[in-house]
């Protein structure tokens, strides 16, 4: 890799938890507008992946009930109903979201490292 390009650092499990995606990828200097676009897409991906995980943990009937709850207008009361429903099914969405966030970060780091390796091999 060229000397003026920053390579992706080796990442520890603590880093995956504590650092944001841009810091992990060595992209802290990326313009905020681009960061915001990537953040929005990443959050959408994490939300979708978490929803799939919830789907896998519920029966078809339970998932239909969950979808009905999700379709209610957002309020403190509807959030409470969703939380109670999932707690009754032993589904911890917060834990699933954290797991998916770490997986997305790990996959992004691995992809960047693969790109760097391919770039280095192509010199």
Image (cartoon, rainbow, N blue to C red):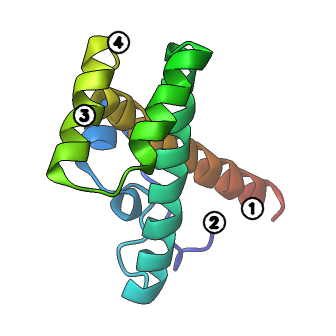
- Is the residue 32 above or below the residue 58 in the image? below
Q: Is residue 64 visible?
A: yes
Badge 3 is on which residue? 81
Cα separation between marks 3 and 2: 52 Å
Cα separation between marks 3 and 4: 12 Å
Q: How many discs appear? A: 4
Number of the front mark, 1 or 4? 4
Residue found at x 77% / y 54%:
118
Mark 1: secondary structure? helix
Q: Mark 2 and mark 1 in contact? Answer it, CB < 8 Å.
A: yes
Badge 2 is on which residue? 1
Q: Which mark is residue 119?
A: 1
Cα separation between marks 2 and 4: 50 Å
Badge 4 is on which residue? 89
* Position in image of residue 23 (x %, y %): 34, 61
First of labels 3, 4 by sequence position = 3
């Amino acid at each position: 890799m060229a000397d003026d390009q920053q390579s992706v650092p080796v990442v520890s499990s603590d880093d995956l938890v504590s650092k944001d995606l841009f810091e992990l990828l060595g992209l802290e200097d990326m313009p905020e507008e681009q960061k915001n676009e990537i953040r929005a897409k990443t959050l959408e991906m994490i939300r979708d992946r978490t929803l799939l995980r919830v789907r896998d943990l519920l029966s078809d009937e339970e998932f239909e009930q969950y979808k009905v709850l999700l379709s209610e207008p957002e309020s403190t009361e509807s959030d409470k109903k969703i939380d109670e429903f999932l707690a009754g099914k032993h589904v911890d969405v917060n834990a699933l979201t954290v797991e998916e966030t770490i997986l997305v970060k790990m996959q992004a780091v691995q992809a960047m490292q693969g790109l760097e390796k391919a770039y280095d091999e192509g010199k």
